């Protein structure tokens, strides 16, 4: 049962609710449904105990609706309810009859009741369900809805005598609400799976496997399949099983992910401390929380931090100073395998959980092994194919777009490749630093990413779609020529100008430099269609949740499989009204006259196209139109003798 009510509650109910949220680990160990077997008098005397148990066992959840400023002494007094059975049938009602003899026998009362299985009522029920969901999520105009623990922390609750009616509050003689109770102790944070959340089978399996491995492991789950929710549900199950005290440290690679994690963690009752900005804003508060846990004044605490702050001496010293039972959750755990971060993994973490769709580090077996040694083996292995079959992710169509390099671009690519081969050790007489080799590799990657033909191809694709919304363009971080001005500019600026000034679309850049506050605005504008297209470089690769994306144009992609696997999963998140996603992938090919067998460029051309085709095959094999997508490149593969690359078409 989910209940939303005014903050005016009987003192007995407030006490019972407080115990239910605060003492969850202790209460859930003893079922209390036996109370219902007693006499009516015994049941009445034990109602508080039963309510506390129902809250602790996640059978009952309560939120408090507070009328926003500007409405005087008004209170939330709506009468709306929905019942649902296990087959999805719903009964919705508005209005009510007070539970009194006078109301039931004498008064003239009315309640409207609608049934979802009746055609005449179906739309009304759907509207009531949407109204309640908006209310529960605090999206109803004029109201702010708080979870009970949050309302208790903020001192929003108001007691009344249990025999007293609150109707007097609307009378002309009433000038003020009952006084607030003040902040209730022991409810700094709670932790439990939200009552409205139904875990999918792969999420339940992940939790079970983690406990079977004694609280260690890495969830290898496809991007968009609910790793964050699964991790928080795991933490809730752990808290219920071991009790207090428990410190939860969640580590994210980027600042914007810290914000997303905080939002999700609050659904589970946590009130995490963000430790990802200036040290002065979090160090003292973190110290106080740890001290209170160490002396028994606080049972549960959570912090969410970035990789950079987590690795800092200021953060590490606090973790070392207080030997408290610790659960470490690492989002995009592959990032912690680098030399500078893996040394920061706390050895005193009793429980360890890593999350990643791609836990293996690219060309770094030592870093991968270090993560496995610390977090444990990979669990679940929930693939993108499984997520598509289960309907966890949205199906997609894939359209590779061949873009031919100019003669000048290919000449530069050829020269860079020859230089890279020499620096890689093929010419033993040349000894240059790895930094120079890295610079050449970056130049070559940028050349492919910003090939001039890609802008023309993008314009052709978007011109008939200039009225469309929910578009995303991935750019490279290099520059392109502007022939009309005889200058160069960054590709992301050229794309933004092309779509905005050229096609008249509302477009906005979304980069690492975009402030967090601006990103929130962009998310809202993009979801509503006010911004038709986002233009990004790399900052949408990991973790950012924008499920409304329906169409992606990939101008640039690295040869690292993690990047395009993460990107694809990000595009396939489900969203209301989103039936299928579309991916337009810009694939470079050499000038036709240079790609014939027997030319001196043939080996390098095969290498260039082969790298591109590996990505194409990966995208095509799970697309709705996979065979058609690969058939588009059949001539190119045949010409370069690459038909046997990756997988055969009949395997798709």
Image: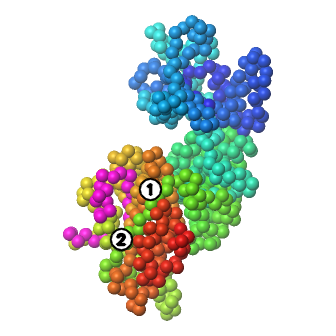
Characterize the local packing of mark 2: few (<14), some (14-19) or many (20 or more) Cα atoms within 10 angstroms.
many
Using residue 466 as the reference point, say whether residue 154 is left or right of it.
right
Q: Position of residue 249 (x, y in %)?
A: 62, 50
Please give the label number shown on residue 581.
Answer: 1
Question: Magenta span has 469?
Answer: yes
Q: Position of residue 78 (x, y in %)?
A: 49, 22
Task: Report the number of numbered marks.
Answer: 2
- The residues bearing labels 2 and 1 have C-alpha atoms spaced at a distance of 24 Å
Which residues lie in the magenta part?
459-485
Residue at 46%, 45% (x, y): give it.
Answer: 576
Residue at 64%, 31% (x, y): give it.
Answer: 60
Name the one closer to the observer, 293 or 581: 581
Q: Position of residue 519 (x, y in %)?
A: 41, 50
Above or below — where is 168 with respect to 185?
above
Question: Magenta span has 307?
Answer: no
Above or below — where is 287 with respect to 602?
above
Q: Residue beneath label 2, please?
A: 450
Name the one closer to the observer, 617 or 333: 617
Q: How is the image coloured?
A: rainbow
Residue at 62%, 19% (x, y): give it.
Answer: 10
Visible residue check, residue 251? no
Using residue 400 as the reference point, say whether residue 381 is left or right of it.
right
């Amino acid at each position: 049962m989910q209940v939303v009510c005014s903050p005016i509650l009987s003192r007995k109910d407030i006490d019972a609710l407080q115990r239910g949220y605060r003492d969850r680990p202790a209460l859930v160990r003893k079922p209390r449904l036996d109370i219902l077997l007693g006499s009516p008098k015994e049941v009445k005397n034990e109602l508080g105990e039963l309510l506390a148990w129902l809250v602790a066992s996640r059978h009952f959840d309560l939120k408090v609706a507070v009328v926003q400023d500007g409405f005087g002494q008004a209170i939330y007094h709506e009468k709306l309810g929905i019942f649902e059975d296990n087959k999805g049938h719903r009964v919705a009602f508005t209005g009510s009859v007070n539970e009194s003899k006078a109301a039931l026998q004498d008064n003239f009362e009315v309640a409207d009741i609608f049934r979802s299985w009746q055609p005449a009522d179906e739309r009304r029920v759907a509207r009531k369900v949407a109204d309640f969901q908006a209310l529960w999520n605090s999206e109803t105009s004029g109201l702010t809805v708080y979870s009970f623990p949050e309302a208790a922390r903020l001192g929003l609750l108001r007691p009344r005598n249990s025999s007293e009616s609150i109707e007097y509050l609307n009378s002309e003689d009433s000038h003020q609400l009952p006084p607030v109770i003040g902040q209730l102790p022991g409810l700094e944070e709670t932790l439990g799976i939200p009552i409205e959340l139904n875990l999918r089978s792969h999420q339940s399996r992940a939790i079970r496997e983690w406990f079977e491995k004694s609280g260690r492991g890495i969830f290898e789950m496809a991007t968009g399949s609910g790793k964050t929710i699964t991790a928080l549900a795991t933490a809730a199950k752990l808290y219920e099983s071991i009790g207090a005290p428990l410190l939860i440290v969640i580590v994210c690679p980027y600042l914007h992910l810290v914000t997303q994690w905080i939002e999700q963690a609050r659904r589970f009752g946590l009130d995490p401390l963000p430790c990802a900005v200036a040290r002065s804003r979090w160090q003292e508060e973190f110290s106080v929380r740890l001290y209170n846990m160490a002396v028994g004044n606080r049972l549960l605490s959570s912090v969410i931090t970035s990789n950079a702050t987590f690795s800092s001496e200021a953060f590490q010293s606090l973790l070392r100073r207080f030997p408290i039972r610790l659960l470490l959750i690492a989002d995009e755990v592959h990032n912690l395998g680098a030399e500078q971060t893996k040394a920061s993994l706390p050895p005193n973490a009793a429980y360890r959980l890593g999350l990643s769709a791609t836990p293996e580090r690219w060309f770094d077996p030592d870093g991968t092994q270090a993560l496995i040694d610390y977090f444990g083996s990979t669990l679940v292995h929930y693939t993108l194919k499984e997520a598509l079959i289960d309907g966890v992710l949205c199906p997609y169509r894939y359209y590779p777009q061949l873009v031919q390099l100019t003669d000048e671009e290919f000449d530069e690519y050829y020269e860079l490749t020859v230089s890279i081969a020499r620096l890689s050790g093929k010419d033993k007489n040349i000894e240059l630093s790895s930094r120079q080799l890295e610079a050449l590799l970056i130049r070559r990657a940028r050349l492919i990413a910003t090939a001039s033909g890609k802008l023309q191809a993008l314009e052709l694709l978007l011109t008939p779609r200039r009225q469309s919304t929910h578009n995303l363009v991935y750019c490279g971080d290099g520059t392109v020529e502007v022939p009309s001005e005889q200058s160069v500019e960054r590709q992301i600026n050229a794309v933004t100008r092309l779509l905005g000034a050229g096609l008249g679309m509302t477009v906005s850049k979304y980069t690492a430099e975009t402030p967090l506050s601006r990103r929130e605005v962009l998310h809202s504008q993009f979801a509503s269609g006010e911004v038709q297209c986002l233009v990004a470089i790399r900052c949408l690769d990991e973790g950012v949740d924008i499920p409304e994306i329906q169409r992606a144009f990939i101008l640039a992609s690295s040869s690292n499989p993690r990047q395009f696997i993460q990107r694809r999963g990000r595009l396939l998140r489900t969203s209301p009204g989103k039936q299928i996603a579309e991916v337009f992938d810009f694939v470079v090919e050499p000038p036709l006259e240079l790609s014939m067998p027997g030319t001196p460029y043939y080996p390098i051309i095969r290498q260039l196209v082969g790298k591109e085709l590996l990505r194409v095959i990966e995208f095509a094999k799970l697309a709705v139109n996979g065979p058609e997508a690969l058939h588009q490149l059949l001539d190119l593969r045949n010409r370069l003798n690459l038909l046997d690359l990756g997988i055969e078409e009949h395997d798709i």
